[in-house]
Amino acid sequence: SSIASDVYTIGLKDNEEVTYYDLLEETLLKSAGDAALYLALSVSDSEDEFNKLVNDKAKEIGLENTVFKDSIGLEKEGQYSSAYDIS
């Protein structure tokens, strides 16, 4: 999956070794799109598969008005959540 040019990244290269902690830190504190994507791909074979996993989990925990379309979490057509689900 490609990352839009206006998304902050830390410039990860294919096969670069980095810890999960570093990826989480970059994702949570700096909103690094490439770190979020690498985390998603560490638990699934593709971003589409990751999206299915998180959407299934969202339904399982009762989020009825939430749909994820990418691992980065920025605005994307068809991706949404309700104030109720977020709370």
Image: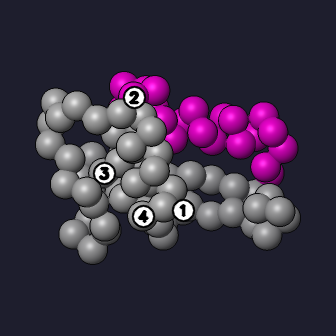
Nearer to us: label 2 or label 1: 2
Marks 2 and 3 close (CB-CB < 8 Å):
no
Badge 2 marks a residue whose secondary structure is helix
Marks 4 and 2 close (CB-CB < 8 Å):
no
Please name the residue that numbered disc 2 is placed on. Answer: 42
Query: Can I make out residue 57 in this image?
Result: yes
Residue type (three-letter) at the residue carrying disc 3: Asp
First in sequence: mark 3 vs mark 1: 3
Please name the residue that numbered disc 3 is placed on. Answer: 34
Marks 3 and 1 close (CB-CB < 8 Å):
no
Badge 1 marks a residue whose secondary structure is loop
First in sequence: mark 1 vs mark 4: 4
Instruction: Give the main secondary structure, helix, strand or loop, of the magenta stretch.
Output: helix
First in sequence: mark 2 vs mark 3: 3
Please name the residue that numbered disc 4 is placed on. Answer: 30
* Spatial separation of the CA atoms under disc 1 and disc 4: 24 Å
Residue type (three-letter) at the residue carrying disc 4: Lys
Badge 4 marks a residue whose secondary structure is helix
